[in-house]
Amino acid sequence: MNSVRYLLLACTITLLYSSSIVLAQESTVSKDLQRLEELSLEELLNVEISVASNVISDKDKQPVSITTITRRQLELSGARTLADALALFVPGFFVTDDQDDLIMAFRGLAPDNNSKVMLLINGQNMNMEFFWGPPYAILAASNYTFIERVEVIRGPGSVTLGQGALLGVINIVTVKGADLKPDPAKGDAAIAMDASMSVGLDNFLLAQVMGRARVGDAKVGFTVSRGAYGGQVYRNEGNARRPNEGFAGGTLFDMGHRLKRNDNVLLQGNIEYKGFEVNVLYTDNQMDLYNFYRDREVYGQTLSSVNLSYKHEFSKDVALKVAGSFIQDDIRLLSLTGVTMGGTREDRYGALAILTVDNLVRGNKLAVGVEYRLFEMGKKNRFGNNFIANVIGRFNPVTANQELTMGYRNDIQVISAFVEDFYSVNEQIDIFAAARFDSHTGWGTNLSPRVGVLFAAAKDLRFRLSYQMGFRGGVGLAYGGGYRNDGYLRSSNLPNIEAARIPGETNRPIVRPEIMNSIEFATTYQIMPGLKVDAVGFYNLVNGILDVGVIYKDPVNPRMPQPGQFNMVPIGSGATQDIPGDWNGFWFFKNALGTLNQWGVEATLAYNSDVFNVSLSHALVQVASVSAEQEDDARKGNSMYLTFDRSANRVRHKVYPENATRLNILATPLRGLDIALNGILYSDWLAPDGSVGKGTLLLNFGASYDILNNLEVSLNVANLANQTPLSPMNANASGPGLQAGAPTIETTTFWVRLRLHF
């Protein structure tokens, strides 16, 4: 741990030192922090894409559906968190709640945690393998102004990125010195820095210093920020009325949670020199799990990351990129009263090599590569803890690490090889194909293919037809075990259930990857200069759905043990033995039986001019068909993705609005004045119990004005119409407490920012 801190400190000092050199060499300071801000939104949205392909960066020739969000859009979005901002801008994306998670849902599918969605920072996979997936320290913090732009793959991205990219991919591109464009008349150096302070209702504070520097081939970018948000009261409705199973009793409302309360610090830096690049990140975030009904209701995460890469060009057509990374993910769990309720740590190591060859055959682009990732799970966090507890007073803090193991010490290795090819047949037709092979310690092997064609029918009319596979194996907890005394049953013990002689229970197979086969047909039509329509239709076939199962001591009276009633016994033996939870049952990951087929359409009409940038989009997703097993699970409330609409007598997506319209306006009516209006209107949705949740219109406002050449003031207002229906909320499969929604939409609120360029 100390070595990581020293490395991060050294990198930060290097960044600051490099900036001071540039300050000494450059007497003229740029008035604008961002060269990119001088471009129109249309130009910004056509910057090169870095996440979906190893060979193609042209936005018009991507093999998948992509949405790009710029820094300026984020700054004026009125969104409290990055996750909220994505929901405003990305068709086919929605944020739902869970009892102890904030769920990133794509195209109708809302899983029980985020492990089926991949988050990258500058192309580096940041997902935790043990359980949670993408870091909440990034997604759920009210501090996201270090981002230059976000690229979102709508649909599977596993062919290039592997497991975890099943439903979608979020790639954050941070501030970089390479974005600065030196003035040739002033030499080859440039610098841009700013400092900002944001304040708002409910004790919102965010202070930030950001800088970029460039001297010849050396480029530096960094951000240092500190933020905190006190949050609004968790209203006494919906899930807030659920009984609290913690030591204090009462209801969730009585516990004193605040909506989206978080405390965050972030240091981020990037250094580039010729073919070398270094990316460092340190962030610490603590947040309320306001929907949770036990005492481990506060989640803290300290994330440290270093990524080194080098690209060598043998010629203009042949290049080799190699990269190595280290990430430390440190998790802590607490009660609102400050009692330590657990924690764990995961260390991740990665190595990557990609060889790209252009024009091996004229018009052809080829990439081949290998990747290795090592996940070391079940380590003690920086406070010396590796345990998990549910209720204060029901465990001994002194012996907690021996009796309540959160994750058993276990290593998972993933070895991957991939190939990608893009061939321009002529000016009208491009064909592409790719495949990725992954070998995983826990679930074995998987081959993911992609194939498609691009057709330019005219200069202003393009089509894409493609097929690709996405996949996600079980999380590391599934294979390594953990949550001791909380009743978790690891995958290797699923074939040992019958040996424990639990009445009515049979053996189950080990957990295999969930697979999505996805077909897309997309078109782009430039109706006239500045006016463009994009549309994509998709059809997904999902099988092996990763779900959660539960074994109760008595399925009829799961929480009411009677005298002489059967008590659960441990399953397995030796070091891999799993014991029942303190509620006298087991829970486990499983592959649900049957298949789910769905279809949808996402269409966007965009208008761009010197004054107005307007985007109007609509996303529709529907269940096409389901197998008998999936329909049965939906009717009983046991399905991960589905529930049964009794009024329409059909299966529908669960906790996901199947229709959503988005409006995004960014206008510059006067020089130095930007005005933004961002809204989402979503349809009614179905809760896990089949009841209907109310859709609504959420509308945000943002504005910024340059008071002076180097001084800017901005205002963000969230939820202008003060709409506060219950938010879609998922719940434990097969478990009690199916919810009709959670009161997690904030009432009208605002914050202001003052930013100084120097």
Image: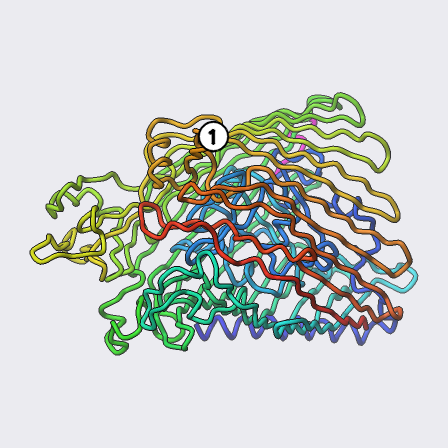
Q: Quadrant of the C terminus?
A: bottom right
The image shows residue 524, relative to residue 79, as above or below, that is above
- What are the residue bounds of the magenta stretch? 356-363
Q: Which residue in the structure is indicated by mark 1? A: 648
Q: Residue drawn 44% across and 34% down?
A: 645
Instruction: In this rendered view, identify the residue nearer to me: 400 or 384.
Output: 400
Q: Residue drawn 45% across and 63% down?
A: 289
Compared across the picture, whether 226 is left or right of 572 comes to right
The image quadrant of residue 639 is: top left
Across and down, in percent, residue 313 comes to 66, 46
Across and down, in percent, residue 480 comes to 29, 54
Across and down, in percent, residue 127 comes to 48, 54
Compared across the picture, whether 231 is left or right of 114 comes to right
Most prominent secondary structure in the magenta stretch?
loop
Q: Amino acid at mark 1?
A: Ala
Judged from the image, the secondary structure of the residue bearing numbered disc 1 is: loop
Sort mark 1 into few (<14), some (14-19) or many (20+) by Cα contacts within 10 Å: few
Instruction: In this rendered view, identify the residue nearer to me: 10 or 645.
Output: 645
Across and down, in percent, residue 196 comes to 73, 72
Q: Quadrant of the N terminus?
A: bottom left
